[in-house]
Amino acid sequence: MADPSSIEQPNHWRKRAVKAVIPAAGMATRFLPATKAVPKELLPVVDRPVLQYIVEEAARAGIDDILLVTGRGKTSMVDHFDRRPDLEAHLTAKGDTERLAAIQQPAELAEIYACRQPEPKGLGDAVTYAESHVGGESFAVLLGDEFMGEDDKLLPDMLDLQARTGGIVLAFIEVPWDEVSRYGIASVQPFESAGELETVQVTQLVEKPKPDQSPSNLAVVGRYVLPNAIFDAIRRTGPGAGGEIQLTDAMALLLSEGVPVHGVIFRGRRYDTGAPIGYLQAVVELACQRPGLGPAFRDWLTDFVKNEVVSGGDRKGGAN
Ligand code: G1P
């Protein structure tokens, strides 16, 4: 059983979590060979790596301390958030203030720390390496291959809800039934609805169910706010889906022991860069929006799509 004193009780305000953990030790087999030497979290989306969008999302939510759980061959992720005095001096000498600000910005977003997960044994296992860093507090977990639109308030809403309800706070999207086996899936009942914010109380959680055994098509997305009791729960959780230690299973254990689990229904823009199709969609969509680049890219894209439709997608060459 979870230690009752470590289970936060609902209905009294507590401190909003200020630390986040980004598990980023995976081998990214879906992107091989691109990710043989380059971490998938550093693949560029227009002009910055995926990981920078995630750290920016955390910083916008008031998180000022981020722990990257990295793995073998992935230390360049930490370099991206370090200063580069040689490059800064070079750009200063050239008077290139725009690029100078762009390379300084990642180091200014938050305090970045790193630790290593020696073997990729699952998301639950990765989170355990954060235990000493987060101390006794609640904390956020942001998965390293998805990020939300710049104008979406998902993470601040989740942090506020967790400060109010304690326990675990998740975020959900509805997915097609034939995709439920890619996600953690929940049964829920209505909790509160205020303005655009719709929240639910979770009654059941299951990792990657088969469609005919799934309790719903409400899928957990890669944002969590977790109480400290999760570490003990992960230690009491055996291998689950895929033979890995699953965070969902540890959360289900806490739920069964009376820890409140709430969720925010997310209706904003989610970029899922964990597989090539979602990565390419993120690149195209954000390129269309980027000032300076967007108008020219949209014009090219419009012509490209028209030509593709006319030619039935048979052309093998470039877009010209
Ligand atoms: C992980 C979690 C899963 C969650 C998903 C969101 O799965 O285990 O519960 O729904 O992230 O992207 P993964 O994508 O690592 O297989």
Image (cartoon, rainbow, N blue to C red):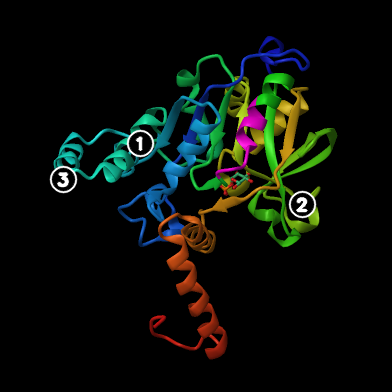
Report helix, strand or loop for mark 3.
helix
Outermost residue on the right side: it is: 190
Kindly indicate the quadrant of the structure image that contains residue 236. Answer: top right
Viewer-closest of 241 and 216: 216
Q: Would residue 57 appear left or right of 115 to someone viewing this image? A: right
Q: Would residue 190 appear left or right of 173 to someone viewing this image? A: right
Q: Identity of the amino acid at label 3?
A: Lys
Residue 139, image x and y in percent?
Answer: 56, 24
Residue 118, image x and y in percent?
Answer: 39, 36
Let me know if residue 151 is in the magenta part. yes
The quadrant of the rendering that contains the C terminus is bottom left
First reached walking from the N terminus: tag 2 or tag 3: 3
Let me know if residue 170 is in the magenta part. no
According to the picture, the residue beneath numbered tag 2 turns out to be 217
Q: Identity of the amino acid at label 1?
A: Gln
Residue 318, image x and y in percent?
Answer: 38, 81
Kindly indicate the quadrant of the structure image that contains residue 12. Answer: top right
Disc ID at residue 105 = 1
Give the CA distance from mark 2 to mark 3.
Answer: 54 Å
First reached walking from the N terminus: tag 1 or tag 3: 3
